[in-house]
């Protein structure tokens, strides 16, 4: 069964064709990277999948349901590119508040658990608005997955994180074995660590879909994966 279905989606902003008839599907439990250069349409795709934007044309289904339905909101976790938790609430208050809204049985306990997992103990009583960009990203990630979502959509999740924190976040995300993951990035090492499959988009269109192993096989001898992807994006491989 596919947990994510995108069929011929078009999204325009004025004269800009952000998405120009994009289609792909992701089986439940699969881990996919959404790869593309700046302005390719990655964030727009994730916003549509999370129900934040509606397509001008085409159809999007999450487990067969509309993205902005109540049922989908319960099972979906979405990290926007520049996520902003409640600035005047502390780290603990943000997590506890979202845990309560999500109907998690013991919100304080869950909030403390997420603080431990993401190494935020030192900042638990700091207001979100006063956190460094990296710690804000840790909090945003914790808020995204606090309800153990079945479908996880992440827009550039490792932005702003130092190397040890990137490793921590990768290991946390890898523990969500059963969840369906779609992670947008233009950094191939992140894609290869978090995903088994890639959807490459450019100018709002899918230009390649397949397994990352197959992507690597398309390279010439010792060719870095970045170079293979660059050739696909510029039309050198189809
Ligand atoms: N709210 C908006 N108003 C106008 N144009 C927009 C808006 N959002 C996105 N766009 C345009 O749509 C296109 C796709 O943008 P999008 O943010 O989806 O790309 P992206 O692949 O996520 O890029 P990046 O890697 O730079 O974050 C771009 O040309 C962008 O300028």
Image (spheres, rainbow, N blue to C red):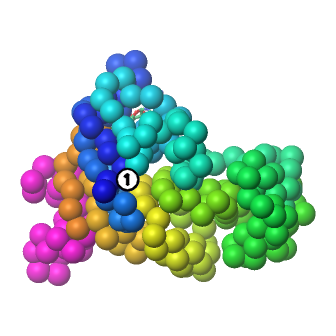
User: In the image, is residue 227 above or below residue 2?
Assistant: below
Q: Give the residues in magenta.
A: 212-238
Q: Which residue is mark 1?
A: 3
Q: Is residue 22 left or right of residue 39?
A: left
Classify 107 as above or below 193.
Answer: above
Residue 6: percent from the left, percent from the top?
31, 41
Left or right of residue 28: residue 221: left
Seen in the image, is 207 located left or right of residue 188?
A: left
Q: Is residue 93 visible?
A: yes
Q: Residues within 10 Å of mark 1 (few under 14, many from 20)?
A: many
Residue 110 position in % (x across, y down): 76, 67
Q: Would the CB of label 1 be found within 8 Å of ligand 1?
A: no
**Residue at position x 60%, y 67% in the image:** 161
| Residue occupying the point 48% across, 56% down | 151
Task: Kindly tell me whether residue 45 is visible in this rendering.
Answer: no
Position above or below: 43 against 130: above
Magenta segment includes 230: yes
Residue 85 location in percent, x, y? 73, 49
Q: How many marks?
A: 1
Q: Quadrant of residue 164?
A: bottom right
Instruction: From the viewer's perspective, tell me whether residue 169 is left or right of residue 196.
Output: right
């Amino acid at each position: 069964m596919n947990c994510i279905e995108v069929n011929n989606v078009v999204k325009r902003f004025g004269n800009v064709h952000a998405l120009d008839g994009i289609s792909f599907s992701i089986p439940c439990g699969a881990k996919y990277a959404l790869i593309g250069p700046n302005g390719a349409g990655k964030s727009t795709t994730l916003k549509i999948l999370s129900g934040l934007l509606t397509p001008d044309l085409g159809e999007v289904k999450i487990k067969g349901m509309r993205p902005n339905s109540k049922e989908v909101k319960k099972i979906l976790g979405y990290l926007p590119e520049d996520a902003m938790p409640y600035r005047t609430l502390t780290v603990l208050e943000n997590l506890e508040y979202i845990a309560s809204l999500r109907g998690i049985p013991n919100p304080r306990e869950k909030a403390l658990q997420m603080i431990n997992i993401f190494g935020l103990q030192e900042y638990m009583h700091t207001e979100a608005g006063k956190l460094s960009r990296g710690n804000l990203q840790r909090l945003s990630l914790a808020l995204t997955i606090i309800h153990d979502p079945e479908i996880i959509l992440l827009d550039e999740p490792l932005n702003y994180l130092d190397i040890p924190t990137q490793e921590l976040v990768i290991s946390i995300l890898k523990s969500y074995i059963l969840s369906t993951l779609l992670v947008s990035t233009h950094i191939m090492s992140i894609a290869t660590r978090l995903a088994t499959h890639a959807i490459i988009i450019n100018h709002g269109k899918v230009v390649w879909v397949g397994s990352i192993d197959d992507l690597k096989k398309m390279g010439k001898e010792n060719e870095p994966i970045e170079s293979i992807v660059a050739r696909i994006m510029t039309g050198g491989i189809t």
